[in-house]
Amino acid sequence: MIDSHYGVVIHRNFKPLYADDIYAQFFGHHTGEEMLALDSLLHLIAPHQRQNAIQTYNAIMSGEEKPSIKTYRNIDTEGNEFIVLTVDHIIDWQGVPAIQTTVVDLSNHVDTLKKLHASEKRYRELVDGSIQGILVHRNFEPLFCNQAYAQALGFSSEEALITNGSILPLYDPSFHEQAHRNNQALLSGQKSAIKTEAKCYRVDGSVVWLGLLSRPVTWNGECVVQVTTMDITKQHRLREQLEHRANYDGLTELINRRAMSELLEHQLRTHQALSLPLCCVLIDIDDFKSINDQHGHHIGDEVLKQFAATCRNNIRQSDHIGRWGGEEFVLLLPDTSIEQAEIIAQRLRKDVSRQTITTNNTQLRFTISMGVATLSHDDHSVIHLLSRADKALYQAKHNGKNQAVLANSTARDC
Ligand SMILES: Nc1nc2c(ncn2[C@@H]2O[C@H](COP(=O)(O)OP(=O)(O)OP(=O)(O)O)[C@@H](O)[C@H]2O)c(=O)[nH]1
């Protein structure tokens, strides 16, 4: 709808016969009466359109042309130009034909359109120049994207991406369910914005991590979703590295004491709640100091790495091995009875004792001692479980090393 007033004027050969006040006010006059003093309405029309106005008048009066809608540039009393829309009708005025013109002031409308175009242009420039990717989609069917979004996913142009029926195949399948849920929440008005991160694949198959901010927007009168994206691949890798460093031992690549402590606490709670057996094996490499002293620290490191690899090969997927510190390790065996734990410990002990590590001049062998403890209902903390395993390990060392001792039991050597 055009938000404008309309005025009415009746004229014959542009000599005004009647004008209402609204028409008069378009031109800076106060009343229609004042307009009647004008010789010709033609002076109100921009000079380059006057000829056209005369031709139209003659054609309508002679019946050659049917009255139709025209736009004119008019001039007010102060010389300001403004745009009007006119509709002419032939009427009978005091027995003689005359033209009745209804005039609508379009200035506001044209101004609004101009401002809209200017703001659309500015928006387009902002979107094109944005380093953030912008995508508009209808249930994942791309409707619009900017260059930054297309480039982040390895497309040569925005058009190349838009022609895809769905953007979902560009996102890792693990994200799809969440994407559908978020889309629904935004379109239903349940949420006004959703921030998330997603693993995506570029056209060449390489991985890119995107930070996404999704909002519902109106697009050609329809409610759709606009996503603003930022390439966070570097930050994501850094975070993964930091998380890895915080939880893993750099030398052996086994989980570290911090991560193992958390795991122990968690496993203790779940196994006690479900009355399931849980065993903990504390392992110490025998005479490690003399390995270092005789062969050098780097060979000592090699022994630690090889031991870690042997452990990984010996345990089930559900078991956990971690470096507790120095040459001490914790093996955590969920859902395992003490009898089964002893079998596993002895198997590992034998495997280790059979291995050789080749140094520059000689072949090196090493052994391990172990303390095996099982979770009791009275264990309120892992400290109790670990302390029993530690006592058993001490016993194993005391009894001559290269053996596994069950907590509160006698040493058993194979
Ligand atoms: N190469 C190397 N040595 C380490 C590392 N961490 C701790 N050690 C050394 O491991 C040795 C442990 O020695 P001790 O605690 O005396 O134990 P041990 O010689 O194994 O004697 P037992 O436990 O009685 O068999 C120390 O000399 C530590 O410096 C490491 O990451 N790399």
Image (spheres, rainbow, N blue to C red):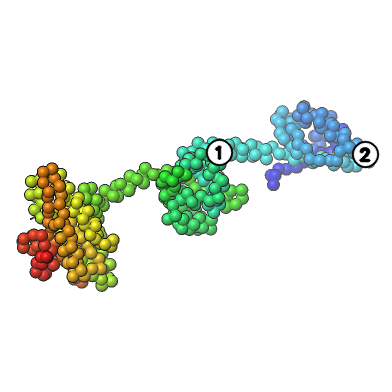
Kind of element beneath mark 2: strand
Kind of residue at disc 2: Val
Query: In this orientation, which residue lies closer to the viewer: 304 or 64?
Result: 304
* Above or below, comparing residue 366 to residue 86 in the picture: below
Residue occupied by mark 2: 96
The reply to whether residue 295 is in sight is yes
Kind of residue at disc 1: Arg
The percent coordinates of residue 413 (x first, y second) are: 10, 65
Which mark identifies residue 181?
Answer: none
Q: Residue at x 15, y 56 (%)?
A: 354
Kind of element beneath mark 1: helix
Give left or right: position of 201 versus 388: right
Query: In this orientation, which residue lies closer to the viewer: 291 or 276?
Result: 291
* Above or below, comparing residue 38 to residue 247 in the picture: above
Neighbor class of circle 1 (other Cα within 10 Å; few <14, some 14-19, many 20+) is few
Which is closer to the viewer, label 2 or label 1?
Answer: 1
Q: Residue at x 81, y 40 (%)?
A: 68
Residue occupied by mark 1: 124
Give left or right: position of 238 versus 32: left
Give left or right: position of 187 versus 102: left
* Above or below, comparing residue 118 to residue 202 in the picture: above
Q: Residue at x 49, y 57 (%)?
A: 180
The first of marks 2 and 1 along the sequence is: 2
The percent coordinates of residue 304 (x first, y second) are: 17, 51
Q: Residue at x 75, y 32 (%)?
A: 74
